[in-house]
Image (spheres, rainbow, N blue to C red):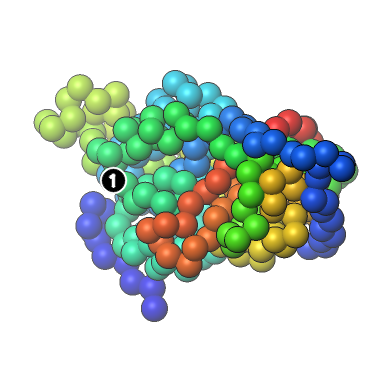
């Protein structure tokens, strides 16, 4: 049962793969680590701008090494959010998230607005033994997606999953802002931004899940050994997504079954219609 506590803001698939190596002994390979953050938020939540602002600042600092998705909750008149979804409620329950805003870094560390920045800096500092390439072709409202995952270390004994989701940038809607004229935040840029912040620009808004759910689909262990490769192809419907604003986010996760030890091995994102290499 999902409960909200008011702290803070009281397809069509085919899959292929190979073991890699081509007759030679593969060696360990590292890839650029992309830190991944889920921002559990709402346009009705007056403290949520604290986290969204930090994410935008860290995106400026780290660039493509940081990927974040705004998970918007707001099903009722009192908590209305036009970007509301229920797809992530199981994820919130799994990690014990019951307040807004809350951040989840690499599906491993639950953070507040005050601890978000340091956790992002820590996450981007490491390398990854998993690489992700995403290739997309857009035809009307259909986006053909090919996701290739390569393993630079042996993950055969792990439960490795692939998560795919569609997000959208630059969606505008009024954002409640408790920082406005709040004496505790006089130095914050949002102190003078008004309450609400009219036509506030929301980035990385979760729109829909592409895999069976946000906890992911299992990648066969035959593909996850050292030098292994896994390829997923699917057709993504992008109806309603503004041209040039849609992105597809991919996560490769080591799911231990525990919220404290499960983690994102790497993440990737691609603009709909483009290609993003490993």
Q: Quadrant of residue 200?
A: top left
Residue 187 x/y as whole percent: 20, 22
Residue at 83 percent of width and 39 percent of height? 24
Hey, which residue is sitting farthest left in the picture? Answer: 183
- The residue sitting at 66% across, 63% down in the picture is 218
Q: Nearer the viewer, residue 227 or 130?
A: 227
Q: Nearer the viewer, residue 165 or 155?
A: 155
Q: Residue 222, can we see it?
A: yes
> From the viewer's perspective, is residue 155 above or below residue 130?
below
Find residue 192 and report its horizontal and vertical position in percent.
26, 26
Image quarter (top left, top right, bottom left or bottom right) of the N terminus:
bottom left
Q: Residue under circle 1?
A: 112
- The part of the image, by quadrant, that contains residue 176 is top left
Answer left or right for 242 relative to 171: right
Percent of width and height locating residue 56: 43, 29
Q: Residue at x 69, y 51 (%)?
A: 225
Q: Residue at x 48, y 67 (%)?
A: 257
Up/down of 18 relative to 128, above or below: below
Q: Residue furthest bottom?
A: 1
Q: Is residue 226 above or below residue 273?
A: below
């Amino acid at each position: 049962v999902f409960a909200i506590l008011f702290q803070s803001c009281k397809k069509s698939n085919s899959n292929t793969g190979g073991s890699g190596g081509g007759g030679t002994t593969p060696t360990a390979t590292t890839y650029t680590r992309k830190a991944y953050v889920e921002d559990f938020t709402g346009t009705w939540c007056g403290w949520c701008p604290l986290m969204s602002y930090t994410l935008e600042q860290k995106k400026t600092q780290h660039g493509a090494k940081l990927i974040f998705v705004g998970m918007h909750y707001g099903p009722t008149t009192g908590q209305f959010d036009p970007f509301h979804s229920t797809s992530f409620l199981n994820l919130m329950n799994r990690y014990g998230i019951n307040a807004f805003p809350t951040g989840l870094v690499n599906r491993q560390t639950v953070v507040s607005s005050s601890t978000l920045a340091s956790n992002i800096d820590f996450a981007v500092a490491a390398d990854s033994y998993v690489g992700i390439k995403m290739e997309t072709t857009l035809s009307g409202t259909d986006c053909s997606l090919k996701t290739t995952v390569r393993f630079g270390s042996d993950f055969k004994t792990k439960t490795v999953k692939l998560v795919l989701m569609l997000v959208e940038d630059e969606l505008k809607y009024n954002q409640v802002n408790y920082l406005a004229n709040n004496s505790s935040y006089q130095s914050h840029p949002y102190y003078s931004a008004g309450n609400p912040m009219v036509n506030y620009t929301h980035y990385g808004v979760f729109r829909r899940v592409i895999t069976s759910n946000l906890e992911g689909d299992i990648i066969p262990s035959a593909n996850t050994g050292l030098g292994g490769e896994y390829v997923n192809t699917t057709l993504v419907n992008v109806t309603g997504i503004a041209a040039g604003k849609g992105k597809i986010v991919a996560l490769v996760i080591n799911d231990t079954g525990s919220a404290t030890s499960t983690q994102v091995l790497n993440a990737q994102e691609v603009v709909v219609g483009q290609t993003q290499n490993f």
